């Protein structure tokens, strides 16, 4: 839907507003960066509410998740360049469209990075998120400098339906569309097969030893997708929170997922919409039963 406004009037005249001194002189909060090496060529860039992961390839670098805003994304880009010097950041992999997980895409795109996301986001990203038009209200890097001189030029958008792979023959980043999950229809989990690391957004995992009653349907969906895709996972790296082992995840979520999953071949044969409803509903039923 296209909406055009011919005239806009502010509800209150700016001159009539009194801005408190504490607000007018407040400094922007400092972006905190904390980096941990997860495996050879793989680093967790944390320090705030949302994490990113930097991955080194033979001839380039990639970032998994550019969250929040320009400030966070620019700090992640700078840290990636420090960790992986003299290599172009060629890709930024996006888990889903929610603003807190896509808000930093524009900064990476301005640097020439190719944005990888689900095909459901193609129109929205091309027509809204990544458009480099001028902005008068809180202008960001892409609106002020359409493509930075430090980058190779305009970024690109690569979309996929079920699976997308970036590989140089040694290191790989594989994005998989998540099945049976109602938080976001475009959600992806991101797998690094060389290091057996699985990265997720908004799906957990829960802390080790979490009672069955507190295991969320989101974590059950993550468990089911790992089994469906036959992924060999050693470590979970969430966009929110700290890394944890798959052994702990299996012990905590496995029993709940086993009781929530549809039985036998039914799950594989039913249509996707009905399957999503059944899996989510079954997980909720299992949680309710565990609370009794």
Image (cartoon, rainbow, N blue to C red):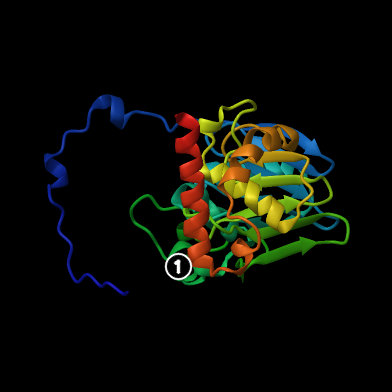
**Quarter occupied by residue 134:** bottom left
Q: Is residue 111 left or right of residue 233?
A: left
Instruction: Classify mark 1: helix, strand or loop.
Output: helix
Q: Residues within 10 Å of mark 1 (few under 14, many from 20)?
A: few
Q: Image quadrant for the N terminus?
A: bottom left
Q: Image quadrant for the C terminus?
A: top left
Q: Is residue 136 left or right of residue 292?
A: left
**Quarter occupied by residue 24:** top left
Furthest toward the right, the residue is 170
Picture coordinates of residue 285 (x, y %)?
Answer: 46, 43
Picture coordinates of residue 93 (x, y %)?
Answer: 64, 56
Picture coordinates of residue 267 (x, y %)?
Answer: 60, 62
Q: How many marks?
A: 1
| Residue depicted at x 59% and y 57% | 178
Picture coordinates of residue 157 (x, y %)?
Answer: 60, 68
Quick check: 91 above or below 27? below
Residue identified by numbered label 1: 124
Residue 188 shows in the view: yes
Q: Nearer the viewer, residue 12 or 259?
A: 259
Quick check: 213 above or below 1? above
Q: Nearer the viewer, residue 109 or 237?
A: 237
| Residue depicted at x 63% and y 65% | 268
| Residue depicted at x 58% and y 55% | 262
Residue 89 shows in the view: no
| Residue depicted at x 52% and y 57% | 106
Quick check: 286 above or below 170? above
Quick check: 133 above or below 79? below
């Amino acid at each position: 839907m296209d909406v055009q406004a011919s005239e806009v009037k502010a509800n209150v005249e700016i001159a009539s507003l009194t801005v408190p001194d504490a607000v007018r002189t407040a400094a922007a909060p400092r972006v905190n960066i904390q980096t941990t090496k997860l495996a050879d060529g793989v680093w967790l860039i944390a320090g705030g509410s949302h994490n990113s992961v930097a991955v080194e390839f033979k001839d380039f670098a990639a970032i998994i998740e550019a969250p929040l805003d320009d400030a966070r994304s620019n700090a992640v880009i700078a840290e990636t360049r420090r960790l992986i010097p003299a290599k172009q950041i060629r890709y930024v992999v996006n888990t889903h469209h929610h603003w807190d997980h896509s808000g930093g895409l524009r900064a990476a795109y301005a640097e020439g990075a190719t944005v990888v996301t689900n095909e459901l986001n193609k129109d929205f990203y091309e027509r809204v998120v990544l458009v480099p038009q001028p902005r008068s209200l809180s202008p960001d890097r892409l609106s002020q400098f359409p493509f930075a001189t430090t980058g190779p030029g305009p970024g690109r958008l690569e979309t996929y339906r079920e699976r997308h792979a970036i590989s140089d023959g040694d290191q790989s980043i594989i994005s998989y569309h998540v099945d049976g999950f109602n938080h976001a229809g475009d959600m992806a989990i991101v797998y690094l097969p060389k290091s057996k690391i699985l990265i997720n957004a908004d799906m957990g995992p829960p802390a080790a030893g979490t009672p069955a009653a507190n295991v969320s349907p989101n974590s059950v969906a993550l468990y089911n997708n790992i089994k469906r895709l036959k992924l060999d996972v050693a470590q979970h790296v969430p966009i929110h929170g700290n890394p944890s082992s798959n052994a702990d995840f299996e012990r905590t979520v496995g029993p709940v997922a086993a009781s929530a999953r549809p039985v036998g071949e039914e799950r594989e044969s039913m249509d996707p919409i009905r399957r999503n409803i059944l899996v989510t509903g079954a997980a909720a039923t299992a949680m309710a039963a565990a609370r009794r």
